Image (cartoon, rainbow, N blue to C red):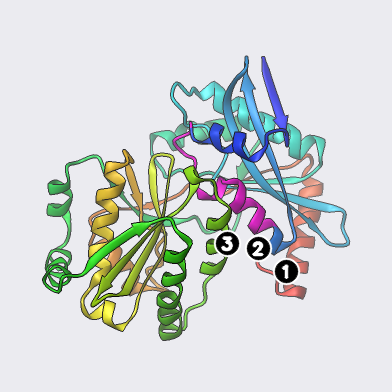
């Protein structure tokens, strides 16, 4: 028997259940959802799907109403969670059907699903389940693109696959006795922020990522969900930092920064090698380097490309709604509202 529990689990039970899924990640943590919703004026809803008492799928979504229309959108970022031990295509289909029934049919929302999966064999299973559950590809949405490194080979093999520039660069921080401090403490995040501010001012880039929001999320996260902070110290002060999430089967790179001293001693290379070693030791299988933009940030693209991962693109967003008329009206209202208010999606 399929049972859907909607907004029934408290924070601790949500996290405990989510930890059983290989596709669990930071964006499905309770506290990320709450912080993001508070900043954008949306509300959070969470659904847990069970078959005969066993949890087979979960999804946290942000529900946002389009002003003056009575219409709304339920957005599921890197969900639903479904890749657990013993998972079947039937379980995935049941989860997607429950999501559609609750948010599209019962509440009349446009449901947007952005699964955390690349184009591979698992993607084919997911695409079939999405289609059979009444979801269709969203138009005009640029899929997430990143480098993903397979962490299963031995460390020696991973280092051999790195570009020669990486191998040369690793010698400099080692020769200058750069050392790394790792942890989850608030003080480490405080030390990271000036490094990020330095690179932000130097490059003058626009980013939807606010490290101070992540700092607040880190305060609230349960110990099992916290982000790992790596700081590279040279001459007794931090010169570079890297923040990652170690959830599910993937190490997800979130924030990275170096000041002028860090760039001179190329500390970022040492940080990424340390991150790889720690992720392998934690039993993770993949390292997602946190997104790439070859045109907008070619230096960052080349830096990540040289690490030896695979250039991957996620399958994008999919939508479901109770009626095509309601979807058309909502999309038109959303577009007009964003244009008038300058509100990002």
Name the residue located 77 percent from the left edge and 68 percent from the top edge. Answer: 337
Q: Quadrant of the C terminus?
A: bottom right
Residue 202 in picture, x, y percent from top left: 41, 85
Depth order, front residue of 21/339: 21
Number of callouts: 3
- Stretch in magenta: 20-37
Q: Quadrant of the N terminus?
A: top right
The label shown at residue 246 is: none
Contact flag, marks 1 and 2 (Cβ < 8 Å): yes
Is 327 situated above or below 16? below
Task: Judge left or right: residue 93 versus residue 279.
Answer: right
Q: Is residue 336 magenta?
A: no
Residue on which the image places disc 2: 345
Task: State the separation of the CA atoms marked 1 and 3.
Answer: 27 Å
Magenta stretch secondary structure, dominant: helix
- Pointer 3 local density, CA inside 10 Å: few below 14, some 14–19, many at least 20: some
Task: Judge left or right: residue 50 versus residue 316.
Answer: right
Residue on which the image places disc 3: 216
Displayed quadrant of residue 55: top right
* Residue 247 can be seen in this image: yes
The secondary structure type at the circle numbered 3 is helix
Depth order, front residue of 151/308: 151
Residue on which the image places disc 1: 338
Residue 176 in picture, x, y percent from top left: 14, 74
The secondary structure type at the circle numbered 2 is loop
- Pointer 1 local density, CA inside 10 Å: few below 14, some 14–19, many at least 20: few
Residue 226 in picture, x, y percent from top left: 48, 50
The secondary structure type at the circle numbered 1 is helix
Task: State the separation of the CA atoms marked 2 and 3.
Answer: 22 Å
């Amino acid at each position: 028997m399929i049972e859907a529990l909607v907004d029934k689990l408290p924070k601790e039970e949500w996290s405990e259940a989510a930890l059983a899924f290989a596709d669990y990640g930071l964006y499905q943590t309770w506290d990320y959802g709450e912080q993001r919703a508070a900043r954008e004026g949306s509300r959070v809803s969470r659904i847990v799907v069970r078959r005969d008492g066993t949890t087979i799928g979960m999804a946290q979504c942000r529900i946002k109403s389009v002003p003056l229309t009575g219409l709304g959108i339920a957005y599921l970022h890197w969900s639903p969670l479904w890749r657990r031990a013993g998972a079947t295509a039937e379980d995935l289909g049941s989860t997607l059907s429950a999501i559609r029934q609750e948010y599209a049919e019962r509440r009349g929302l446009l449901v947007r699903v952005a699964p955390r999966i690349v184009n591979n064999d698992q993607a084919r299973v997911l695409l079939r389940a999405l289609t059979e559950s009444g979801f269709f590809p969203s138009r005009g949405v640029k899929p997430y693109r990143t480098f993903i490194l397979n962490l299963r080979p031995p460390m020696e093999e991973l280092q051999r696959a790195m570009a020669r520039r990486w191998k040369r660069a690793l010698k400099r921080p080692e020769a200058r006795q750069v050392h790394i401090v790792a942890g989850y403490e608030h003080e480490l995040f405080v030390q990271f922020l000036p490094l990020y501010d330095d690179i932000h001012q130097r490059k003058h880039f626009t980013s939807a990522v606010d490290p101070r929001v992540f700092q607040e999320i880190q305060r609230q996260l349960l110990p099992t969900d916290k982000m790992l902070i790596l700081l590279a110290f040279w001459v007794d002060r931090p010169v570079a930092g890297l923040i990652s999430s170690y959830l599910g089967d993937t190490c997800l790179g979130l924030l990275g920064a170096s000041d002028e001293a860090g760039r001179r001693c190329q500390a970022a290379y040492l940080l990424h090698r340390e991150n790889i070693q720690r992720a392998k030791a934690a039993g993770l299988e993949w390292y997602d380097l946190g997104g790439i933009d070859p045109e907008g940030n070619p230096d960052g693209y080349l830096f990540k490309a040289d690490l030896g991962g695979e250039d991957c693109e996620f399958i994008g967003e999919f939508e479901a709604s109770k009626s095509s008329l309601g979807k058309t009206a909502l999309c038109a209202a959303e577009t007009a509202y964003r244009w008038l208010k300058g509100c990002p999606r």
